[in-house]
Amino acid sequence: MNGYSEDLRCRIVSAVQRGMPKSQAARTYEVSLSSVKRYANKAARGGPLAPKRSPGSLPKLDEKAGRLLAADLEQRPCATLQDRCDYLQAATGLSVSRATVCRAIARIGSTRKKGGE
């Protein structure tokens, strides 16, 4: 789940600073009371109200590798996953597993059907 936008957080804090009770601000903006308290405390300390980056690691295959993989799917539709791993390593220097390539192919939307007849 993504955090609330910085704009909404600023509106909540400004409402509390204008004198609106925190519980009423929570009901008005449809957020939890603990979120209102957290945003008000951050603003009082002078901290940034922007949401933090989502947790998790960055994807191994970037946009360039995705485009190369899509082009390889069109050029060599019958190549195995290992062949595609070897191709990506030769082209980009990234060593990725067959599972990573399989998930990337699924995101591209390619199917296993080989012929159009």
Image (tube, helix red, strand yellow):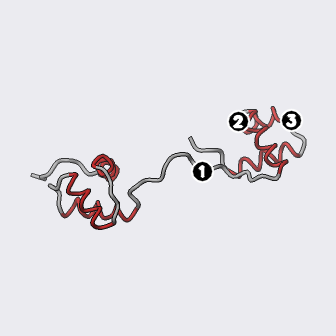
- In the rendering, at what x and y percent does residue 97 appear? 30, 50
85 w.r.t. 106: above or below: below
Label 3's element?
Answer: loop
Q: Residue furthest left?
A: 117
31 w.r.t. 115: above or below: above
Callout 1 amino acid: Arg
Q: Quadrant of residue 33?
A: top right
Q: CA distance from mark 2 to mark 3?
A: 14 Å
Q: Residues within 10 Å of mark 1 (few under 14, many from 20)?
A: few
Say which mark, if any, is on residue 30: 2
Q: Residue at x 83, y 44 (%)?
A: 15
Q: Residue at x 81, y 43 (%)?
A: 40
Closer to us: mark 2 or mark 1?
A: 1
Say which mark, if any, is on residue 53: 1
Q: CA distance from mark 1 to mark 3?
A: 29 Å
Q: Residue furthest right?
A: 19
Q: Residue at x 17, y 48 (%)?
A: 113
Say which mark, if any, is on residue 42: none
Mark 3 lies on residue? 21
Residue closer to the observer: 6 or 97: 97
- In the rendering, at what x and y percent does residue 17 appear? 87, 46
